[in-house]
Image (spheres, helix red, strand yellow):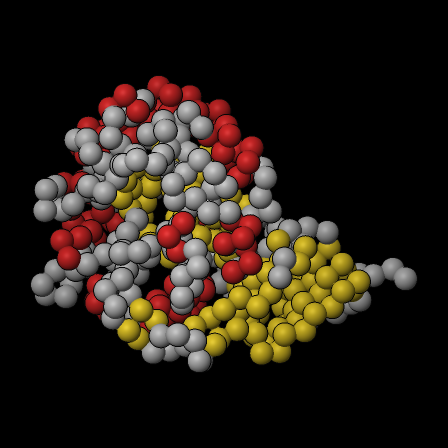
């Protein structure tokens, strides 16, 4: 028998913010490509799956996390910790530098089913054990980072530079200047973690960034807050966005505050992307930390579901220069698909300061990567 498709997945709701799909329907896959999606998908398939109570999305894109099978103190196996939970594409924040990026490419990028891209660390050691990645000025090697980045081609998206006190024991302004030099030489953006604002004002840091650079950890509270005492987003933050600087709402262990996120959303300031900063300390956590749960927190903070879907799909795909390949259900795109179901009885949604919000939690029920069912 000749089949029209290799895999046909029907769902109670099919959503693609890039093409405008939203409603009951199906996605048809042949090989590793999507060939049809929507309400009127007919034909025969070698394998058909039906999920009337689930929502089908393009495979989720996590713009800031730590996929690394070895060589990074933060690293986790992406095929164990990301892919089964709905993330088919993930960007590494600095898990490798110039000295070990080739090993990272072979083991993690080429050795994973998950699609992995690297924001290479300005530190040529990447993320070694024993302290901050920026603790030795000799490691902040502009020439070595430039050479590795150009060698990496499309696999190296940009330059990771986190100059918070946790990651940088050197002069943060010097480190940022060197990162900008590499970025200019290579035509790459920065993935930037700010230094503590009590020592270096946010306005001064943002003024150095360029259109296309991504600031991460934006909904952190305390001295980091981008929301002022009047519950409005700081004018310097809005000015940076006007210039084209991008903002990533990364969660991690201590970088997500419901108070800050709710105030920013109420003020009309939405993140460009939503990411997890998922790393080794999250393994085995209860409730488990992943992108579907992080997405649920942003809905609880006041974002609409469509706004959230775009920020883990089409928008990060565009930023990663993968538009048309991922983050979409358009025919011809890679057949990366995630099905989510809402669990109303899931553990409460908790931020980094133990604040809680109701609302249930999305959980991955099926993942397809390049046309092959993962779970």
Closer-to-camera residue (236/369): 369
Closer-to-camera residue (9/140): 140
- In the current view of this chain or complex, which residue is farthest to the top? 143
Residue 229, percent from left and from top: 9, 63
Residue 130 appearing in the image: yes
Closer-to-camera residue (290/315): 290
Residue 338, percent from left and from top: 56, 62
Task: Please say if 8 is above or below 206.
Answer: below
Determine which quarter of the picture holds residue 35.
bottom right
Residue 30, percent from left and from top: 73, 55
| Residue at the image point whose x is 29% and y is 65% from the top | 351
Query: Which part of the image, by quadrant, shows the N terminus?
Result: bottom right
Task: Please say if 312 is above or below 90.
Answer: below
| Residue at the image point whose x is 19% and y is 31% from the top | 170
Residue 202, percent from left and from top: 15, 46
Report the side of 220 relative to 43 (left or right). Answer: left
Closer-to-camera residue (97/115): 97
| Residue at the image point whose x is 29% and y is 25% from the top | 140
Query: Which part of the image, by quadrant, shows the C terminus?
Result: bottom right
């Amino acid at each position: 028998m000749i089949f029209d498709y290799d895999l046909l997945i029907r769902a109670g709701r099919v959503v693609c913010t890039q093409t405008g799909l939203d409603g009951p329907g199906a996605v048809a896959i042949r090989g590793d490509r999507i060939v049809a999606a929507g309400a009127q998908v007919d034909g025969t398939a070698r394998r058909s799956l039906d999920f009337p109570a689930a929502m089908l999305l393009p495979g989720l894109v996590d713009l800031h996390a730590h996929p690394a099978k070895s060589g990074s103190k933060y690293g986790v196996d992406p095929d164990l910790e990301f892919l089964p939970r709905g993330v088919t594409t993930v960007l590494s924040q600095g898990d490798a530098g110039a000295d070990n990026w080739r090993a990272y490419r072979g083991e993690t990028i080429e050795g994973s089913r998950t699609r992995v891209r690297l924001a290479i660390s300005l530190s040529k050691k990447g993320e070694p054990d024993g302290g901050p990645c920026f603790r030795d000025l000799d490691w902040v090697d502009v020439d070595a980072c430039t050479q590795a980045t150009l060698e990496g081609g499309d696999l190296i998206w940009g330059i990771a530079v986190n100059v918070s006190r946790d990651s940088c024991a050197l002069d943060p302004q010097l480190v940022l200047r060197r990162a900008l030099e590499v970025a200019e030489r290579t035509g790459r953006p920065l993935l930037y973690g700010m230094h503590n604002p009590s020592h270096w004002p946010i306005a001064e840091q943002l003024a150095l960034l360029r259109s296309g650079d991504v600031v991460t950890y934006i909904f952190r509270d305390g001295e980091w807050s981008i929301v002022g005492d009047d519950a409005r987003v700081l004018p310097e933050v809005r000015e940076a966005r006007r210039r084209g600087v991008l903002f990533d709402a990364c969660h991690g262990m201590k970088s997500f505050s419901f108070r800050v996120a709710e105030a920013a959303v109420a003020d009309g300031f939405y993140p460009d992307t939503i990411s997890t900063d998922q790393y080794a300390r999250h393994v085995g956590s209860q409730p488990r930390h992943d992108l579907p749960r992080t997405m649920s927190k942003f809905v609880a903070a006041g974002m609409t579901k469509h706004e959230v879907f775009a920020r883990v799909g089409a928008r990060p795909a565009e930023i990663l220069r993968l538009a048309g390949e991922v983050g979409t259900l358009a025919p011809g795109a890679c057949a990366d698909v995630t099905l989510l179901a809402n669990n109303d009885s899931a553990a409460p949604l908790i931020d980094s300061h133990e604040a809680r919000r109701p609302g249930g939690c999305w959980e991955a029920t099926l993942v397809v990567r390049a046309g092959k069912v993962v779970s």
